[in-house]
Amino acid sequence: MTLQRGKVYLVGAGPGDPELLTLKAVRAIAAADVILHDDLVHPAVLDHARPGVRVIAVGKRGGCASTPQAFIERLLAQEALAGHTVARVKGGDPFVFGRGGEELARLRAAGIDVEAIAGITAGVAAPARLGIAVTHRDHTSGVAFVTGHAKPGGAGPDWDALARSRLTLVVYMGVANAAEIRSRLVHGGLAATTPAAVIQDASLATERAVVTTLDALAHTIERERIGSPAIIVIGEVVRAADLARAAPAELVATARI
Ligand code: SAH
């Protein structure tokens, strides 16, 4: 007798607000026998799970105790090979700084059926909260999603090239390195007066946002105690930001954008 093989859904849960889940994500979560979720996933997302299914938290927030990636991949494979339907639920989109690519490759190599379900990535959802259109055609020809926190031993983004690109820059995992990002971009030739926005906890009740300049980026983050998770948006498109949603007013005034 051969065992019926299971399936793994790599599910994007969107930026936070459970209403930003896709219908397909809800369906995959509802079909799952086992759910592995990371800690940027809102607890209400799990309300869609069937009663009694196994739910395993595998958080890996920077600086906190985390579940090793190899362990997660082994567990996913093991559950699928045991015939279970597995939902691997991640914040945002599974393939945007989400290690979805690594998990997909590992599972496919083990002969496991994997289906990715796209989610709304924070790099688009967070600016949208301020009415910032990341590819507004009056200002830019595109957008670059970059990490502000390179993989250990990795080179990280080519900030000189990005500074010259005239693209909107959307930086994930960047708040702790804002001073360095500023100096690299200014060194690369991007005007220090370029507008910048930072949005923490986008789409959640705890959301906070500031609008400032590239020059004042680190200072503003520190002063307003903006912490992770936050998205930094740098570029002319930030001029359209709805300042009524960005706090506080006097800061916006002093930022001189
Ligand atoms: N796969 C996710 C990104 C994971 S990397 C996605 O597509 O959105 C984690 C980083 O995402 C955080 O450091 C932060 O930069 C960003 N992020 C995730 N959720 C966020 C939120 N609700 N508000 C602001 N930034 C968020």
Image (cartoon, rainbow, N blue to C red):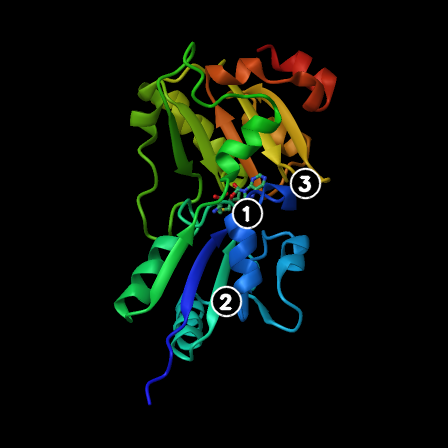
Q: Percent position (x, y) of residue 105?
A: 30, 60
Q: Percent position (x, y) of residue 169?
A: 42, 27
Amino acid on which disc 1 is placed: Leu
Name above or below for residue 104 compared with residue 146.
below
Marks 1, 2: nearer the viewer: 1
Residue 78 visible in image: yes
Q: Is residue 134 found left or right of 15 in the rendered image?
A: left
Distance between the alpha carbons at the discs numbered 1 and 2:
28 Å
**Which is nearer the N-term, disc 3 or disc 2?**
2
Q: Is residue 128 found left or right of 8 in the rendered image?
A: right
Please say if the residues under marks 1 and 3 sit with CB atoms less than 8 Å apart: no
Amino acid on which disc 2 is placed: Thr
The residue at which mark 3 appears reads as: 204
Distance between the alpha carbons at the discs numbered 1 and 3:
19 Å
Name above or below for residue 59 compared with residue 194.
below
Q: Secondary structure at mark 2?
A: loop
User: Looking at this view, is 157 or 82 the one in front?
Assistant: 82
Q: Residues within 10 Å of mark 1 (few under 14, many from 20)?
A: few
The residue at which mark 1 appears reads as: 23
| Mark 1 Cβ inside 8 Å of ligand 1 | no
**Residue occupying image coordinates x 37% and y 75%:** 5
**Residue occupying image coordinates x 53% and y 70%:** 34
Give the image quarter of residue 240.
top right
Marks 1, 3: nearer the viewer: 1
| Mark 3 Cβ inside 8 Å of ligand 1 | yes
User: Looking at this view, is 23 or 148 the one in front?
Assistant: 23
The residue at which mark 2 appears reads as: 67
Amino acid on which disc 3 is placed: Leu
